[in-house]
Image (tube, grey):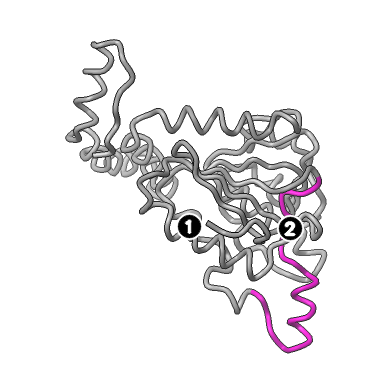
């Protein structure tokens, strides 16, 4: 979709979309160009019938993303401008609205906005060399986007991340349940692809309903969340795929999912 020299690469193969931040010389920092290209993908991926799951990763083994490109921001500040006021979705909320599953394959440092990208993903695989930090307090910036961490990590860990602004290792966050998988760097993408293929091979309506109902329940609570989930799954039970699944099982073959 984008040129090979683009700050963000994107390709779709076998119904798996792979987003790669391509700025290793700047530790894959998030520039205005990265913002714009990611925003474009998040706005189009749900409409692409050839995509069932998305992986987001980055080039190299040093950094997933060091966060906002502070050099670019320094240049903008000299002109009286702020990057967050120049992009459509400064807190990357559109990523959280994507209906299809997103897997973050964290290949190195995930700091500030890089942490946010990992946080906004639905599933997270990281290499042992990865480190996670919310560094905004060190540079006088803000991290309002970190509030959802309270539903992912204990309060004291969330406070440690935001107030000390010091990194936490991938191993510690794996132990705390923030990461789904922790692997050697050379196994990172293959492990993420393995997870993506498992999701891709399942009924797409069931997968998307699962994501929506579980995320909605974080706001609604148990009773209303269950009621909401029953409503969401109505379209699943009445779909052609709900007929195809048992039929394929009985015939001992792979199901031919239609997503309807």
- Is 133 in the magenta? no
Quadrant where the C terminus is found in the figure: top left
243 and 77: which one is in front?
A: 243
Image coordinates for residue 247, horizontal then vertical, percent = 21, 18
Residue name at image x 17 percent, y 35 percent: 238
Front of the two marks 1 and 2: 2
Of label 1 and label 2, which has the lower sequence position?
2
Give me the C-alpha separation between circle 1 and circle 2.
20 Å
Residue in the image at 74% along x and 58% along y: 23
Q: Left of 161 or right of it: where is 154?
A: left
Asked whether the residues under the numbered discs 1 and 2 touch, taking CB atoms below 8 Å apart as contact, a structural biologist would say: no
- Is residue 66 toward the left or the right of residue 220 in the image? right
Helix, strand or loop for disc 1: helix
Q: Residues within 10 Å of mark 2 (few under 14, many from 20)?
A: many
Which one is in front, 118 or 204? 204
Residue toward you, 132 or 30: 30
Circle 2 SS class? loop
Front residue of 257 and 166: 257
Q: What percent of the width, then of the height, locates residue 96?
A: 48, 54
Q: Which residue is mark 1?
A: 42
Q: Which residues are magenta?
A: 62-83
Residue shown at 79% from the left, 42% from the top: 61
Q: Position of residue 156 (x, y in %)?
A: 70, 46
Residue 137's quadrant in the figure?
bottom right
Left or right, residue 82 beside residue 204: right
Q: Which mark is residue 23?
A: 2
Residue located 48% across and 57% down the image: 42
């Amino acid at each position: 979709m984008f040129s090979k020299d683009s700050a963000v690469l994107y390709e779709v193969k076998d119904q798996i979309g792979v987003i790669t931040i391509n700025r290793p010389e700047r530790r894959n920092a998030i520039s205005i160009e990265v913002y714009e290209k990611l925003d474009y993908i998040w706005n189009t991926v749900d409409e692409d019938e050839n995509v069932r799951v998305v992986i987001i990763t980055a080039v190299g083994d040093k950094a997933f993303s060091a966060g906002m490109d502070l050099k670019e921001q320094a240049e903008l500040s000299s002109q009286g401008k702020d990057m967050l006021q120049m992009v459509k979705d400064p807190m990357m909320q559109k990523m959280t609205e994507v209906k299809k599953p997103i897997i973050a394959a964290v290949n190195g440092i995930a700091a500030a906005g890089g942490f946010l990208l990992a946080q906004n993903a639905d599933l997270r695989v990281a290499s042992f060399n990865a480190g996670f930090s919310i560094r905004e307090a060190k540079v006088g910036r803000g991290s309002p986007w970190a509030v959802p961490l309270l539903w992912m990590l204990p309060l004291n860990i969330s406070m440690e991340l935001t107030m000390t602004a010091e990194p936490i290792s991938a191993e510690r966050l794996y132990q705390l349940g923030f990461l789904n998988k922790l692997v050697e760097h050379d196994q990172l993408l293959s492990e993420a692809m393995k997870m993506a293929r498992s999701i891709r091979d399942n009924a797409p309506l069931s997968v998307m309903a699962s994501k929506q109902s579980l995320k909605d329940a974080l706001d609604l609570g148990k009773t209303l969340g269950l009621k909401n989930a029953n409503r969401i799954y109505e379209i699943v039970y009445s779909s052609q795929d709900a007929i195809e699944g048992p039929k394929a099982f009985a015939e001992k073959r792979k199901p031919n999912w239609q997503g309807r």
